Image (cartoon, rainbow, N blue to C red):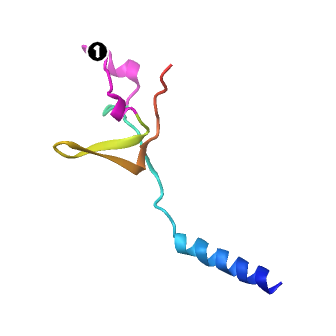
Amino acid sequence: MLKTILLLALVALLLQACGASQPTKYYLLTSENTNDRSESVKGDTVIGIGPVVIPEYLDCKQIVTRSKANALEVSTYHQWAEFWIKI
């Protein structure tokens, strides 16, 4: 019985030592114009760009930023809320 109590106390102590991780933050890309698209296009010229090819090292859920000239930083706690799926 004493061994069980000591084991539970040790497990509780170890779990407390782990600490809490940062909450993950999710980001979305939105247009500057929040009006209905059908209203904003009336009489405006629309230009499309494509196809757009995203390199494999950027094709991930985590946000990737350039930290130095030749270094990328992959964020663990900052992710895209909408992630495209290749079909």
Instruction: Judge whether 69 appears above or below 47 on screen.
Output: below
| Main secondary-structure element of the magenta-colored stretch | loop
Residue at the spot 72% in from the left edge and 83% down from the top edge: 6
Residue carrying label 1: 48
Q: Quadrant of the N terminus?
A: bottom right
- Judged left or right of residue 30, residue 12 is right
Instruction: Say whether residue 53 is magenta.
Output: yes
Quick one: 50 or 61, which is closer to the camera?
A: 61
Q: Is residue 19 left or right of residue 39?
A: right
- The residue range painted magenta reads 35-59
Looking at the image, which residue is at 42% across and 50% down?
Answer: 76
Residue at point 60% right, 71% down? 15
Q: Look at the image and say whether residue 14 sits in the magenta stretch.
A: no
| Residue placed furthest toward the left | 69
Q: Position of residue 66 (x, y in %)?
A: 24, 44
Position of residue 81 in the picture relative to residue 63 (left or right): right
